[in-house]
Structure formats: structure tokens, C-alpha cells
Amino acid sequence: MIARHETQMDKFDVWAALSAPLPAGVISWRQDGRPIARDGRHIARFVAYIEANTVRERLDSVVPGEWDLTLELLPTVTGLDEDANQGACSFKARLQILGVIREDVGTGKDYKQAATDAFKRAAVRFGVGHELYAYEQNWVQLDGDGKFAKPVEDPAAAYARRYGRPTAVAATAPVSVTRAEQESAVPVTSEPRAATAAGPLATQEESCPKCGGRTWDNRLTKKNPKAPDYKCRDRSCDGVIWPPKGDKVEKAERPDRAEPVMASIHDQDEIPF
């Protein structure tokens, strides 16, 4: 009986180790969407992400030889507009760690991108890289609006200057695995809700209609006026808020509530992935 208790406690330590904060050096930033013009400048939203190899290294260091990944190619989804953020390929990843299974779907422009996206999404359900979902929006000025435009400052430095060091780890509880899951090894699909909003947009955010978490405000950047105004930040949730029927407000007439953010920093739409 004592040995069994000690084994269970060791497993709880494993889940905590999987969801431990990632080293700052493995977090990168990439541009999300096209630049937009604001007050004579060109700005774009940047999102934080980690490489699939970082996830693999975390799994190998915490549960070497005790995790297994299977991928299932899904049918191609057609008929979606360009703002649906869907890739040409989709995979469903099934990640098993110590008998506990989590699944998620990833998309990409090719098999490799879609497969790694699915892998990282499934790993988030065990807490790997979960803190990236709590990052604020990061708007960074570019040196132009062309295909090869570059940010005028490092997106990580821009984020730190506006918000300081990310505190997402303290704000968002890691994904936990219960004792019942350990004993029965049943699939679990629940996900913790995102942290309460903070900062200049804290009182103006819309909540996800499905999970109640935080959402991305796409009103200023979407190209299709019929696309959703808000999209859930949790990539495993498909909650969206559509624009009011008959809404003919042009982008130039939309509220400037995101303007304070655009001075240099402010996001993260994908694990961040």
C-alpha cells in the first residue's frame, strides 16, 4: 500500500515537471497576419511559439521512453474563407504518457507542418508550453508593408518593454492529471480556462461563448468583414463571436480601442505554436 502511494505521488511530480515553465531561450516570435497601417506606421501582430523539438526534449527529459505519439491524417477541409486560418493538411495527434491519453488536431500547409502542429497541441493538454496562451497581444512596428518587411525591434524585447517579463506561469494553472486518470488511464479532454485579463484591454475583452476564456479581437486586422470578430485564444476550442447581422462598419471606422496596444507591443494566438 505504501509503495503504491509513493508511485502515485511520483506520477504527480511528473505532471508538474511536464508543465514547468519553459526556458526563455526556446520561445520564439513570428508574425501573424499581414501588416496594417496606423498613424503613418506599419505594424503587425507577433505571436510566441516553440518548436516541436522543444516539446520532444521536454518529454524525453521527464518521461524518457514512457510516451508515445500516433498521428492520423484527416480529410481536407474545403470551402473556408481565407480568414478561417485553416491549413491545407490536418492531422489528429494522440499522445500517451504513462497510460494517460490526450488528443488534438493540427493544421498546416503541408504534412510536416500539420503533424508538428498537432503534436504540440496535444502536448499542451499535458501542460507543455501552456503558459504561452496567457501572453498579451504583441503589436510591433515594421520597417515597411512589403513581403520582406522586418520588425524595427526584437518582438521579445518589445513585449518585455511594455509588459515586463511574462507572468503567464503564475497566472495560468498547469494542466493536471488526477489520480483517477492515473489508475484508469482514461482520455481527458478538459482544459483549464485562461487567466483573467490584465492590462489596457482588461475591461473590453469579450469572453469565449463556449469555454468562457479569453478571445482574440480580430476586428482591426481581418480582411473579410463576414469573418468572426473574436476568436477563442485556446486553440483546442473553436468558440467565435460573429459580427452583428447587417454590420457594414468599415475597418477605418472601427473602434480605436486596440490603438494603445499598437504603440509597440501586445499577443499570442497560437500554441503559440
Image (tube, rainbow, N blue to C red):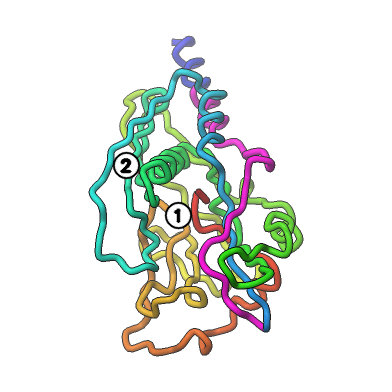
Closer to the camera in the image, 216 or 158: 158
Name the residue at 28% across, 38% down. 72
- x and y, in percent, of residue 132 in the image: 57, 49
Image quarter hosting the N terminus? top left
Reading the chain from its start, which is encountered first: label 1 or label 2? 2
- What amino acid is at disc 2? Lys
Closer to the camera in the image, 122 or 199: 122
**Residue 98: quadrant of the picture:** top left
Name the residue at 42% across, 45% down. 113
Q: Is disc 1 surrounded by few (<14), some (14 to 19) or many (20+) residues within 10 Å? A: many
Q: Nearer the viewer, mark 1 or mark 2?
A: 2
Q: Is disc 2 surrounded by few (<14), some (14 to 19) or many (20+) residues within 10 Å? A: many
Determine the secondary structure under disc 1: loop
Left or right position of 196 against 69: right
**Residue position for label 1:** 234
In magenta segment, residue 78 = no
Left or right position of 191 against 149: left
Label at residue 219? none
- What amino acid is at disc 1? Asp
| Camera sees residue 227 | yes
In magenta segment, residue 30 = yes
Residue range (magenta): 11-39
Q: State whether residue 259 is above or below residue 158.
A: below
- x and y, in percent, of residue 256 in the image: 59, 83
Determine the secondary structure under disc 2: strand
- x and y, in percent, of residue 15 in the image: 51, 30
Label at residue 92? 2
The image shows a total of numbered marks equal to: 2
Name the residue at 55% across, 32% down. 16
Q: State whether residue 111 is above or below residue 12.
A: below
Name the residue at 48% across, 11% down. 2
